Image: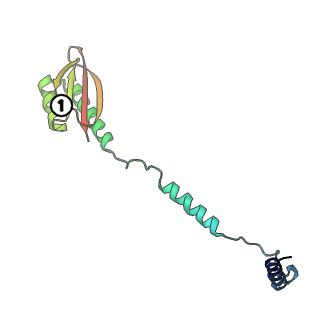
Amino acid sequence: MSKKKQDFLGVCKSIAFTWPKKEGIKQNTTQKGFVFTMEAALSLLMLALMVAALPQPAPFSLKELAITQQANDLLRVWSAKSTNEMGMITDTNNLFLGNAELWNNEKKLIFAAAKGNSIATEGIILDDFLVERKIRIVVYYD
C-alpha cells in the first residue's frame, strides 16, 4: 500500500474513533415539536414573493355606477316631463360637460370625441300622444 493511502486510512481511523458513538448521543423522541429548517424558511419566503408578484386588481371605483345612475336619472326626468330635443341637449351638456353623445331615434343630437372608456344607457320614452322615442346616452370617461 502506498504512503498516501496509509496516511488517508490513518486519518479516517482517528476521525472514526473521535466521532461520537450512537450510544453517546442522547435522543429524546418523547417530546412533541417540530424543526423549522432553513429550507422551509426559504420555501415560505419564495411562496410569499410569488403571491406578492401576482397582478393586483384595479382599485375599486364607483365612477361607473355614478355615471350610469346620472344617465338613468336623465331618462326618468325626460320621460316624466316630455322634454323636447333642445332640452335634452342642454341637460346632457350640463350634466356630462360635453363628454357624452345623445341619440334620439337613431339620430345623433350631440357629437363627442371618443376618449377612453364609455358607458351607454338606452331608454324608450312615450310622449303625450304615445309616440315612442328611443333615447341613447353614451358617456365617455377616463
The C terminus lies in which quarter of the figure? top left
Disc 1 residue crowd, few under 14, some 14–19, many 20+, Cα 10 Å: few
How far from the left and from the top, in percent, is residue 126?
Answer: 25, 19
In this rendering, position of residue 1 left or right of residue 44 = right
Render colour scheme = rainbow
Q: Name the one closer to the observer, 66 or 36.
A: 36
The N terminus lies in which quarter of the figure? bottom right
How far from the left and from the top, in percent, is residue 128?
Answer: 20, 17
The residue located at (81%, 80%) in the rendering is: 3
The residue located at (20%, 32%) in the rendering is: 100
The residue located at (15%, 34%) in the rendering is: 93
How far from the left and from the top, in percent, is residue 66?
Answer: 29, 41
In this rendering, position of residue 49 left or right of residue 120 = right
The residue identified by callout 1 is: 112
Q: Amino acid at mark 1?
A: Ala
Residue 130 to residue 5: above or below: above
Q: Name the one closer to the observer, 42 or 20.
A: 20
In this rendering, the count of numbered labels is 1
Q: Name the one closer to the observer, 64 or 39.
A: 39
Residue 6 found in image quarter: bottom right
Residue 28 found in image quarter: bottom right
Q: Name the one closer to the observer, 13 or 77.
A: 13
In this rendering, position of residue 37 left or right of residue 24 = left
How far from the left and from the top, in percent, is residue 139?
Answer: 24, 34
